[in-house]
Image (cartoon, rainbow, N blue to C red):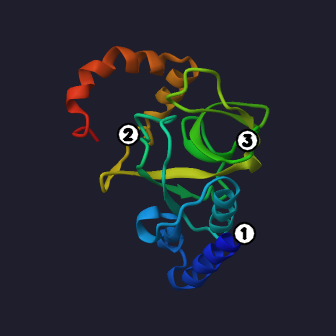
Amino acid sequence: MLQKERTMKTVARQAPALEGSWLAASPCVAERNDLSLSGLELLDLLRDILSKGLSCRFQARGSSMAPFVNDGEVITISPLAGAAPRIGEVVAFIHPEMQKPIVHRIIGKRAGTCLIKGDNIPCGADGYVLPRNILGRVSRVERKGRSVWAGLGPERMLLAFLSRTRLLLWLRLWFGPFLRPFKGTLP
């Protein structure tokens, strides 16, 4: 708890000087401060930063969104700012069962809820999530210091459809071996 309070004070101390800038949330980027948060600590920090209208950058962990967001890449989460999340968008949300922040894609909507699933998960979706449990949207992905927009642009609708029907995994299995020689050179 003491570490969380120190983190929150650091963010609060820097936020007025950088108001309206995504840099105000920079303490959550490991390379800047070696600050490592997970679970409830990260959830509290994300809520506090996004509620102030600021964006937060942090290093993604895991492969559930590969190849569009890979392990170790820096992602920027921006507030929803009153705009409803759309099908195909990659969002940070509170997982309904684990109660921790996760970053996955919205693949459908029903009765005011969003169906969310990781692009690289072979089993079912995370479930239907209430809009109040969606923290923000991924507005940027940085790979090796360069912005990558694949999966965040207009193609996100197609990716949502392919993910929902599980065709995205089959396409990766079929075409993955052909793309391996280019790994690290593709955006």
Up the image or down, 182 lies above or below 79; here it is: above
Q: Nearer the viewer, mark 1 or mark 3?
A: 1
Tell me which amino acid carries mark 3. Met
Residue 47 sits in quarter: bottom right
| Residue 168 numbered tag | none
Find residue 123 and report its horizontal and vertical position in percent: 61, 21
Find residue 184 and report its horizontal and vertical position in percent: 25, 40
Find residue 181 and report its horizontal and vertical position in percent: 20, 28
Label 1, residues with CA under 10 Å away: few <14, some 14-19, many ≥20: few
Residue occupied by mark 2: 150
Residue occupied by mark 1: 1
The quadrant of the image that shows the C terminus is top left
Residues at marks 1 and 3 touching, judged by CB atoms closer than 8 Å: no
Q: CA distance from mark 2 to mark 1?
A: 38 Å
Up the image or down, 67 lies above or below 171; here it is: below
- Say left or right for 171 vs 1: left
Q: Residue at x 41, y 49 (%)?
A: 73
Q: Residue at x 79, y 32 (%)?
A: 111
Q: Residue at x 60, y 40 (%)?
A: 86
In this rendered view, identify the residue nearer to me: 181 or 48.
181
- Say left or right for 47 vs 60: right
Q: Residue furthest front?
A: 2
Q: Is label 2 in a helix, a strand or a loop?
A: loop
Tell me which amino acid carries mark 2. Ala
- Say left or right for 114 vs 64: right
Residue 81 sits in quarter: bottom right
Residue occupied by mark 3: 98
